[in-house]
């Protein structure tokens, strides 16, 4: 017998022993039968019955209904089948009513393998109430920083602010704010790090113009928003006024220089202690 044949027989022997060991291990560990998960169906939302629910009056805001009209009910409504075959909503009252309001012909429902009893006993009612409370209590909405980051990703993928508003069913005014923050690395960083309202972070984005003076203005506003929030609007307006004054002076200086007017080395400089003012500017005599 050649060495190659001996090697092949040895490999086959090792594989056979390994397979036998795996089979023995599986025989000793019986797999428990999987518990039934329920039945996924598509049904007319008008044909289901709204069962007892801890949620009282349901507010169907316009954006919610528009979202269902455009994209349907994304999460299946949980129902139980009654003895007469009727489907009773266990979780998803708002989604069901929203689908009806949006004119949806069909919605996905997950039929609980446990039937809906004719009359729940005390233990059954407790279980239902806890289930329905937990469904909403333990849900958290996206943070403003997460919303801004998501809108930035959509911008990077080529959507405009208007398209983002339409696709996400978010008011255009809010999307203008979130995308202005998203376009400013400084403002987005402040939003992620500090507990400052989105509308004020949008003001920070307004001053993030890529200049050193803009960076200093963002810093000043960030400090004000945290330490003296009542003065935020006042400080922001003062910085706007100083920025506009600086722009007008620079524009006038450029006009005078273009006209051949030269400033004197002894000409006074405009004094300003705000971080938005930038370095002192020498003022031609014509502006004094």
Image (tube, grey):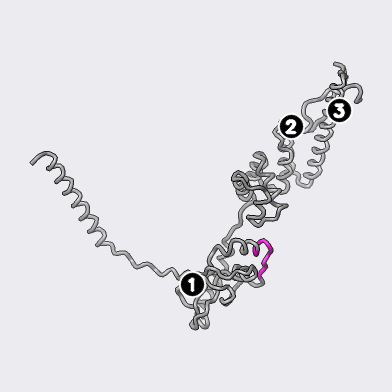
Which part of the image, by quadrant, shows the C terminus? top right
Span highlighted in magenta in the image: 58-65
Spatial CA distance of label 2 from label 1 is 62 Å
Mark closer to the chain start, 3 or 2: 2
Q: Is residue 216 left or right of residue 27?
A: right
Residue 97, position in %: x, y?
62, 71
Residue 82, position in %: x, y?
50, 80
- Look at the numbered disc 2 and give the secondary structure of its residue: helix
Q: Mark 3, mark 2: which one is toward the viewer?
A: 3
Q: Mark 2 points at which residue?
A: 213
Q: Name the residue under label 1.
A: 111
Spatial CA distance of label 1 from label 3 is 75 Å
Q: In front: 51, or 119?
A: 51
Q: Mark 3 points at which residue?
A: 252
Which residue is pictured at 39% across the width and 69% down the height?
35
- Look at the numbered disc 1 and give the secondary structure of its residue: strand
């Amino acid at each position: 017998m050649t060495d190659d044949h001996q090697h092949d027989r040895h490999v086959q022997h090792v594989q056979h022993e390994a397979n036998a060991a795996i089979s023995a291990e599986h025989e000793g560990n019986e797999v428990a039968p999987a518990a039934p998960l329920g039945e996924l169906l598509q049904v007319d939302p008008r044909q289901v019955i709204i069962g007892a629910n801890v949620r009282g009056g349901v507010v169907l805001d316009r954006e919610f209904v528009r979202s269902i009209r455009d994209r349907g009910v994304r999460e299946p409504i949980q129902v139980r089948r009654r003895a007469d075959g009727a489907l009773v909503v266990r979780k998803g009252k708002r989604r069901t009513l929203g689908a009806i309001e949006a004119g949806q012909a069909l919605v996905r429902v997950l039929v609980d393998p446990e039937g809906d009893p004719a009359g729940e006993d005390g233990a059954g009612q407790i279980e239902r109430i806890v289930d329905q409370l937990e469904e909403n209590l333990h849900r958290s909405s996206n943070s403003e920083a997460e919303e801004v980051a998501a809108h930035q990703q959509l911008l990077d993928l080529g959507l405009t602010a208007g398209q983002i508003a339409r696709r996400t069913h978010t008011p255009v005014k809010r999307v203008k704010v979130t995308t202005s923050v998203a376009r400013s690395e400084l403002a987005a960083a402040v939003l992620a790090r500090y507990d400052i309202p989105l509308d004020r972070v949008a003001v920070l984005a307004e001053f993030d113009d890529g200049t050193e003076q803009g960076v200093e203005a963002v810093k000043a506003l960030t400090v004000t928003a945290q330490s003296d929030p009542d003065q935020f609007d006042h400080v922001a307006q003062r910085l706007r006024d100083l920025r506009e004054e600086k722009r007008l002076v620079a524009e006038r200086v450029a006009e005078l220089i273009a006209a051949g007017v030269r400033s004197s080395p002894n000409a006074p400089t405009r004094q300003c202690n705000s971080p938005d003012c930038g370095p002192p500017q020498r003022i031609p005599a014509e502006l004094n």
